[in-house]
Amino acid sequence: MDTVCKEKRGSVLGDDLILSVVVGSRGYGLDVAGSDTDRRGVFVAPTQAFWRLDKPPTHRDGPLPEQFSWEVERFCVLALEANPTVLECLWTPLVEVITPFGERLRGMRRAFLSERARQTFWGYAEAQFRRLDPAAPKWKQAMHMIRLMRCGLDLVRHGELVIEVGQDRERLLAVKRGEVAWAEVAAWRERLAGELAAAHSVLPAKPDRAAVEEFLLDVRKAHL
């Protein structure tokens, strides 16, 4: 069940924030003493701002500490492309700020899903793997590579993005601490890669763009 705090929006949060969630180690269930609180948000620019030559920003830092926020249209575009970082915002159980439009966005999260997710999750994990040096691995990066592949596999098989790592927590933290041999990490990756490639997908071929566009139009009308 989501942990939700519906805060009052005002000078601190800004009147345009519709969603703020916690991701990173705390969202994944991999936090330890001293872990940062990584936040992601979605804001709505005034509709009239799009009528000008200079368009509103597609993203920004803040307004909450350790937060990166997307303008709602950019967020939707990235989610339709099965961007793992963006999709996590729709499934993390840690929701700090949410408005009716934020609730609607979270409620329609399956409209963004498509078979493309198999390639994007694989691609993001592979990019991390290519940056790892077996002679001197960055163990935190190796941990997140494995976590990302697990998430992609769950999404393809079940149509749900399982954010919390559950029973794999201690093993993943051991990877982060460098207590797992590189050969074992590489074997874990190979097994997950094979499962992800062969998994029967429950995801649709394409996302529901019509539903997403209807949501976006309603947002723009409401913010005239």
Image (spheres, rainbow, N blue to C red):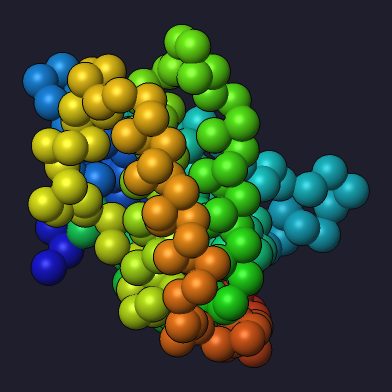
Residue 40 visible to the viewer? no
Q: Is residue 63 left or right of residue 171?
A: right
- Locate the N terminus and report the quarter of the image it occupies: bottom left
Q: Which one is in front, 189 or 102?
A: 189
Disc tally is 0
Q: Residue at x 48, y 61 (%)?
A: 194
Q: Residue at x 61, y 31 (%)?
A: 130
Residue 60 visible to the viewer? yes
Q: Residue furthest top?
A: 136
Q: Which one is in front, 143 or 45?
A: 143
- 70, above or below 177, in the image: below
Q: Residue at x 49, y 19 (%)?
A: 134
Q: Residue at x 19, y 27 (%)?
A: 174
Q: Residue furthest right?
A: 53
Q: Where's residue 120, x and y in %?
A: 60, 58
- 206, above or below 6, in the image: below
Q: Is residue 13 left or right of residue 208?
A: left
Q: Where's residue 144, x and y in %?
A: 38, 37
Q: Where's residue 116, x and y in %?
A: 62, 70
Q: Quadrant of residue 212?
A: bottom right
- Locate the C terminus and report the quarter of the image it occupies: bottom right
Q: Which one is in front, 46 or 121?
A: 121
- 208, above or below 28, in the image: below
Q: Is residue 187 left or right of residue 133?
A: left
Q: Where's residue 142, x and y in %?
A: 40, 30
Q: Quadrant of residue 11?
A: top left
Q: Is residue 101 left or right of residue 23?
A: right
